[in-house]
Amino acid sequence: MNRIQQLIKGNTKFKSQYFPYFESELIKSIKHGQKPEVLFIGCSDSRVTHDLMLDSKPGDMFILRNVGNFIPPFQADNDFHGSAAAIEYAVSVLQVKDIIVCGHSHCGACKSLYEEIPDDDSLVHIRKWLELGQKAKEFTLRTIQDPNNKEELYRQTERNSILYQVENLFSYPAVKQKVDAGTLKIHGWYYSIETGDIEYYDLVEKKYKPISELKP
Ligand code: ZN
Protein backbone atom coordinates (compact mmCIF):
# COMPACT_ATOMS: atom_id res chain seq x y z
CA MET A 1 0.00 0.00 0.00
CA ASN A 2 1.51 3.35 -0.96
CA ARG A 3 1.22 6.56 1.09
CA ILE A 4 -1.78 7.94 -0.82
CA GLN A 5 -3.67 4.67 -0.35
CA GLN A 6 -2.86 4.86 3.38
CA LEU A 7 -4.21 8.41 3.52
CA ILE A 8 -7.44 7.36 1.81
CA LYS A 9 -7.81 4.56 4.35
CA GLY A 10 -7.06 7.12 7.05
CA ASN A 11 -9.98 9.26 5.92
CA THR A 12 -12.31 6.27 6.21
CA LYS A 13 -11.04 5.69 9.78
CA PHE A 14 -11.41 9.41 10.58
CA LYS A 15 -15.03 9.47 9.38
CA SER A 16 -16.02 6.40 11.36
CA GLN A 17 -13.99 6.88 14.57
CA TYR A 18 -13.42 10.60 15.14
CA PHE A 19 -15.77 12.67 13.00
CA PRO A 20 -18.93 11.72 14.98
CA TYR A 21 -17.41 13.46 18.05
CA PHE A 22 -17.08 16.76 16.19
CA GLU A 23 -20.08 16.52 13.90
CA SER A 24 -22.60 18.60 15.85
CA GLU A 25 -20.05 21.36 16.60
CA LEU A 26 -19.02 21.46 12.96
CA ILE A 27 -22.61 21.71 11.73
CA LYS A 28 -23.13 24.61 14.18
CA SER A 29 -19.97 26.32 12.94
CA ILE A 30 -21.20 26.17 9.35
CA LYS A 31 -24.19 28.28 10.40
CA HIS A 32 -22.32 30.72 12.65
CA GLY A 33 -18.76 30.62 11.24
CA GLN A 34 -15.54 29.51 12.86
CA LYS A 35 -14.57 31.08 16.18
CA PRO A 36 -11.05 29.90 16.97
CA GLU A 37 -9.50 31.73 19.93
CA VAL A 38 -5.91 30.87 19.07
CA LEU A 39 -3.66 31.52 16.10
CA PHE A 40 -0.99 28.83 15.96
CA ILE A 41 2.08 29.68 13.92
CA GLY A 42 4.25 26.62 13.38
CA CYS A 43 6.79 25.13 10.99
CA SER A 44 5.76 23.16 7.90
CA ASP A 45 7.94 20.29 9.16
CA SER A 46 6.01 17.03 8.77
CA ARG A 47 6.80 16.03 12.37
CA VAL A 48 5.14 19.10 13.90
CA THR A 49 1.56 17.92 14.26
CA HIS A 50 -0.28 20.72 16.04
CA ASP A 51 -3.59 18.88 16.61
CA LEU A 52 -1.89 15.72 17.89
CA MET A 53 0.66 17.40 20.14
CA LEU A 54 -1.93 19.71 21.74
CA ASP A 55 -4.95 17.42 21.51
CA SER A 56 -6.81 20.28 19.80
CA LYS A 57 -10.07 19.80 17.93
CA PRO A 58 -11.51 21.20 14.69
CA GLY A 59 -12.37 24.83 15.36
CA ASP A 60 -9.88 25.35 18.22
CA MET A 61 -7.03 27.01 16.36
CA PHE A 62 -6.48 29.01 13.20
CA ILE A 63 -3.29 27.62 11.68
CA LEU A 64 -0.41 29.25 9.87
CA ARG A 65 2.47 26.98 8.97
CA ASN A 66 5.44 27.91 6.84
CA VAL A 67 9.10 27.04 6.47
CA GLY A 68 10.76 27.72 9.84
CA ASN A 69 7.69 29.30 11.49
CA PHE A 70 9.14 32.61 10.33
CA ILE A 71 7.13 35.83 10.52
CA PRO A 72 7.88 38.42 7.86
CA PRO A 73 7.80 41.98 9.20
CA PHE A 74 4.73 44.07 8.34
CA GLN A 75 5.12 45.44 4.84
CA ALA A 76 2.10 47.10 3.28
CA ASP A 77 2.84 46.81 -0.44
CA ASN A 78 1.26 45.08 -3.42
CA ASP A 79 3.14 41.80 -3.10
CA PHE A 80 1.57 38.46 -2.20
CA HIS A 81 2.06 38.13 1.56
CA GLY A 82 0.46 34.82 2.53
CA SER A 83 1.74 34.67 6.09
CA ALA A 84 0.86 38.31 6.74
CA ALA A 85 -2.65 37.76 5.35
CA ALA A 86 -3.20 34.85 7.75
CA ILE A 87 -2.00 36.94 10.71
CA GLU A 88 -4.25 39.85 9.71
CA TYR A 89 -7.27 37.62 9.26
CA ALA A 90 -6.75 35.91 12.61
CA VAL A 91 -6.19 39.15 14.52
CA SER A 92 -8.54 41.62 12.82
CA VAL A 93 -11.39 39.39 11.61
CA LEU A 94 -11.43 36.32 13.88
CA GLN A 95 -10.13 38.40 16.80
CA VAL A 96 -8.12 35.59 18.35
CA LYS A 97 -7.12 36.09 21.98
CA ASP A 98 -3.78 34.29 21.83
CA ILE A 99 -1.04 33.79 19.25
CA ILE A 100 1.38 30.90 19.70
CA VAL A 101 4.63 31.09 17.76
CA CYS A 102 5.87 27.53 18.00
CA GLY A 103 9.37 26.58 16.93
CA HIS A 104 10.76 23.07 17.18
CA SER A 105 13.91 21.02 17.59
CA HIS A 106 15.83 19.72 14.56
CA CYS A 107 14.32 22.45 12.38
CA GLY A 108 15.70 22.17 8.85
CA ALA A 109 15.11 25.88 8.22
CA CYS A 110 17.24 26.93 11.22
CA LYS A 111 19.98 24.44 10.32
CA SER A 112 20.11 25.66 6.74
CA LEU A 113 20.92 29.17 7.99
CA TYR A 114 24.44 27.75 8.42
CA GLU A 115 24.60 26.11 5.00
CA GLU A 116 25.27 27.40 1.53
CA ILE A 117 22.02 27.53 -0.44
CA PRO A 118 22.76 26.83 -4.12
CA ASP A 119 22.31 29.89 -6.33
CA ASP A 120 19.62 28.11 -8.26
CA ASP A 121 16.28 29.31 -9.63
CA SER A 122 14.53 26.33 -8.05
CA LEU A 123 15.44 27.69 -4.59
CA VAL A 124 14.90 31.40 -5.20
CA HIS A 125 12.09 31.75 -2.66
CA ILE A 126 13.81 29.66 0.01
CA ARG A 127 16.95 31.81 -0.21
CA LYS A 128 14.92 34.97 0.33
CA TRP A 129 12.73 33.45 3.04
CA LEU A 130 15.72 32.30 5.12
CA GLU A 131 16.74 35.95 5.54
CA LEU A 132 14.09 35.97 8.26
CA GLY A 133 16.34 33.73 10.36
CA GLN A 134 19.50 35.80 10.01
CA LYS A 135 19.04 37.85 13.17
CA ALA A 136 18.63 34.68 15.23
CA LYS A 137 21.73 33.20 13.63
CA GLU A 138 23.83 36.31 14.28
CA PHE A 139 22.64 36.57 17.88
CA THR A 140 23.36 32.88 18.50
CA LEU A 141 26.86 33.12 17.07
CA ARG A 142 27.53 36.16 19.28
CA THR A 143 26.31 34.53 22.48
CA ILE A 144 27.04 30.80 22.22
CA GLN A 145 29.98 29.47 24.23
CA ASP A 146 31.16 26.92 21.68
CA PRO A 147 29.97 27.53 18.09
CA ASN A 148 31.64 24.25 17.07
CA ASN A 149 29.11 22.34 19.14
CA LYS A 150 26.61 21.99 16.30
CA GLU A 151 23.91 20.39 18.43
CA GLU A 152 23.97 23.36 20.81
CA LEU A 153 24.28 25.85 17.93
CA TYR A 154 21.16 24.56 16.18
CA ARG A 155 19.07 24.17 19.36
CA GLN A 156 19.91 27.71 20.50
CA THR A 157 19.23 29.13 17.04
CA GLU A 158 15.80 27.47 17.02
CA ARG A 159 14.97 28.91 20.44
CA ASN A 160 16.36 32.37 19.64
CA SER A 161 14.54 32.49 16.32
CA ILE A 162 11.18 32.23 18.08
CA LEU A 163 11.95 35.48 19.94
CA TYR A 164 12.93 37.31 16.75
CA GLN A 165 9.77 36.08 15.00
CA VAL A 166 7.70 37.37 17.94
CA GLU A 167 9.50 40.71 17.56
CA ASN A 168 8.43 40.79 13.88
CA LEU A 169 4.87 40.00 14.93
CA PHE A 170 4.82 43.26 16.88
CA SER A 171 5.48 45.19 13.66
CA TYR A 172 1.83 44.48 12.69
CA PRO A 173 -0.11 47.55 13.91
CA ALA A 174 -3.22 45.53 14.82
CA VAL A 175 -1.14 43.06 16.87
CA LYS A 176 0.66 45.77 18.79
CA GLN A 177 -2.54 47.70 19.41
CA LYS A 178 -4.36 44.64 20.79
CA VAL A 179 -1.44 43.51 22.94
CA ASP A 180 -1.17 47.05 24.39
CA ALA A 181 -4.93 47.02 25.05
CA GLY A 182 -4.65 43.66 26.82
CA THR A 183 -6.95 41.81 24.41
CA LEU A 184 -4.24 39.70 22.76
CA LYS A 185 -1.41 37.63 24.23
CA ILE A 186 1.67 36.36 22.39
CA HIS A 187 3.37 33.10 23.38
CA GLY A 188 6.75 31.76 22.27
CA TRP A 189 6.79 27.95 22.46
CA TYR A 190 9.43 25.36 21.62
CA TYR A 191 8.46 21.79 20.76
CA SER A 192 10.94 18.92 21.06
CA ILE A 193 10.14 16.39 18.36
CA GLU A 194 12.23 13.74 20.15
CA THR A 195 10.30 13.89 23.44
CA GLY A 196 6.98 15.63 22.69
CA ASP A 197 7.78 18.20 25.41
CA ILE A 198 6.88 21.85 24.94
CA GLU A 199 8.63 24.77 26.63
CA TYR A 200 7.42 28.37 26.79
CA TYR A 201 9.49 31.53 26.95
CA ASP A 202 9.08 33.25 30.29
CA LEU A 203 9.36 37.00 29.70
CA VAL A 204 10.12 37.76 33.36
CA GLU A 205 12.86 35.19 33.86
CA LYS A 206 13.97 35.50 30.23
CA LYS A 207 14.30 31.77 29.68
CA TYR A 208 12.39 28.76 28.40
CA LYS A 209 10.48 26.74 30.98
CA PRO A 210 8.26 23.63 30.85
CA ILE A 211 4.78 24.41 29.52
CA SER A 212 3.24 22.80 32.61
CA GLU A 213 4.50 25.82 34.60
CA LEU A 214 2.72 28.35 32.37
CA LYS A 215 -0.07 30.22 34.14
CA PRO A 216 -2.22 31.67 31.34
ZN1 ZN B 1 11.13 23.58 11.14
Image: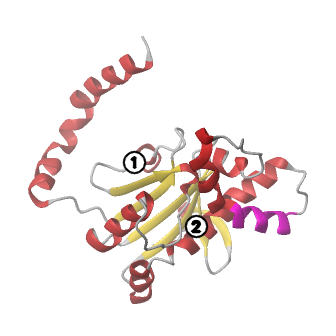
Q: Main secondary structure of the magenta part?
A: helix
Q: Residue at 66% of width from left, 66% of height from top?
A: 208
Q: Which residue is mark 2?
A: 165
| Residue 206 appears anywhere in the view | yes
Find residue 25 and report its horizontal and vertical position in percent: 16, 51
The way the protein has been coloured in the rendering is secondary structure
Instruction: Report the amino acid beneath label 2.
Output: Gln
Vertical arrangement, residue 104 with respect to residue 166, above or below? above
- Residue 81's label in the rendered image is none
Is residue 207 toward the left or the right of residue 116 in the image? left
For the N terminus, the quadrant is: top left
Q: In the shown orientation, is residue 122 left or right of residue 96? A: right
Q: Position of residue 60 (x, y in %)?
A: 31, 56
Residue 55 is marked as 1
Query: Which residue is found at the position 31% from the left and 22% from the top?
Result: 8
User: For residue 141: magenta?
Assistant: yes
First to last magenta residue range: 134-144
Circle nearer the viewer, 2 or 1: 2
Instruction: Please tell me how crowded label 1 is: few (under 14), some (14-19), or many (20+) other residues with Cα within 10 Å.
Output: few
Q: Amino acid at mark 1?
A: Asp
